[in-house]
Image (tube, rainbow, N blue to C red):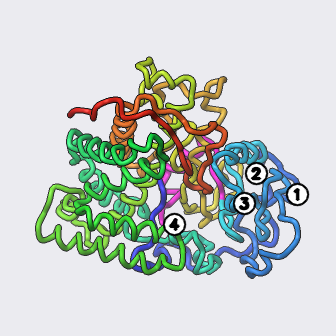
Amino acid sequence: MTTPPHVNGTTPQPHPAATSSPHPTASSPHPPATGAPHPPAAAPHHPTGTPAAPPTEALAAPGPAPTCPVTGAPADRATGATALYGPGLDGDMLPALYERLRAAYGPVAPVSIAPGIGAWLVLGHRELLQLTREEQDFSHDPRRWTLLREGRVPADSPLLPMVGWRPALLFTDGQQHRRMRSAVSDALDGINGHELRRQVRDTAESLISAFTARGEADLVADYARLLPMQVITGLLGVDRQTGKALVEAIAQTVAATAASAEASKRMGGILMALIEEKRRQRGNDITSALLHHPARLTDEEVLHNLVVMFVAGNQTTVNWIATSLRILLCDPGFRSSFTGGHMTVDDALDLVLWKFPPTQNFPARYATRDMTFGGRHVRTGDMLILGLAAANADPKILPEAGRPVTGNRSHLAFSAGPHTCPAQDPARLITRTAVDTLRHRLPDLELACPEDELQWIKSPWSRGLAALPVRFSSATAAPEQP
């Protein structure tokens, strides 16, 4: 899942339950817990026990880039911890970085997620389950975050659109979360699976027809990136023209550029107009279901939950479709799927969720008390990042061969606990139908470049292909019938 942006300039506010006084700034790191891996003394043991971030010019000072003395990976100049940001981070190098962090620190490792901003990355499968299930110790509410409360997160930080509080289920705990989740879950459960499959198939057929005459395509730009957003806007009850404007506004908002603030206002305006329309005249769509649910969500709550559902669901499904197609095209165990082999599309979808989860790291949880967690001293108000990809690769839960067993769905691609993604069933239906439709329309599909030339997008959060070039002779199969 990808975290959503702010809407209409929402500003993070202090959490009412947060302590009124900030943590004392530590001048030296905490010692490691007894029995925990003991990195060299120069390594940071607490990612937030550092002074405020230095000026930008200091961060950009000339000289060789610093490296973490423990992992040897690029490090943050201010915290000294391994940097989980920067242009070099992509899907090819991150798995090795996770294993270096695991070897050095165990299941919980100190990292920096932006210049001067430290956090804990949870790498262990067992620890991630604990993190997601124990709300009394790990809150979803970013107003508890110490660095934010102390004013140590720059106002223009690219993190704020991802973690700033808003009234949506993703940022609430306890009863408030259960109230919102009941509305969202019921709205999603109300989707007619047969109708959704028809909508996905029709959309897929239209997209495929647009490029079949060329005999080649980029299945990311021409297919995977277009299909989910068209389907999801339809589920929200948005007409095609308005959906196009909404998609453009959301894309500009999440791009985190100078145009993002204005795009965010447009996005909020489009959604509020939709909400007002569905208040007046209920339709058979998710927006209407949220507005008329017994949980009695306010218009503001509906707006922010729609943003969460669209942004999180769209990019995740884009990545899932594209990576599944790569598996079917390139993995020897799945190539026969195009010619009627024993492995199914669902097997490919599950393998992607294990090895290439569409969201590889997810922010965040915030410690509600001081504790020892995964061998690390975690303080009240610390941020903890869900290392979904790293936890899936935890050697403690994988077979000796390192390849997940076909049909095993104990992965953490959709998180776990009370905040498990409520949209995983419709997301699977969309992805499976998109892959199946393409598979039947273009049975001679093949990769148009060597597999080792395929590149992942540069992001520590999302795991998706930058492009998937293919070629084919023609649409040899007729369009699939209902």
Q: Earlier in the sequence, mark 4 or mark 2?
A: 2
- Label 1 SS: loop
Residue type at numbered disc 1: Ala
The kind of residue on which mark 2 rests is: Ala
State yes or no: discs 2 and 3 in contact (Cβ < 8 Å). no
Q: Earlier in the sequence, mark 3 or mark 1?
A: 1
Q: Mark 1 = which residue? A: 41
Tell me the distance, in whole angstroms, between the alpha carbons under discs 3 and 4: 18 Å
Q: Is residue 129 magenta?
A: yes
Marks 2 and 3: which is nearer the front? 3
- Figure quadrant of residue 48: bottom right
- Give the amino acid type for the residue marked by disc 3 in the picture: Ala
Q: Residues within 10 Å of mark 1 (few under 14, many from 20)?
A: few
Provide the secondary structure element on which disc 4 rests: helix
Q: Which residues are magenta?
A: 120-141
Q: Earlier in the sequence, mark 3 or mark 4?
A: 3
Q: Earlier in the sequence, mark 1 or mark 2?
A: 2
The residue positioned 53% from the left and 57% from the top of the image is 138
Give the foreground label among 1 and 4.
4
Quarter of the image that includes the C terminus: top left
Report the Cα–Cα distance between label 3 and label 1. 18 Å
Which residue does the numbered mark 2 point to in the structure image? 33
**Label 3 belongs to which residue?**
83
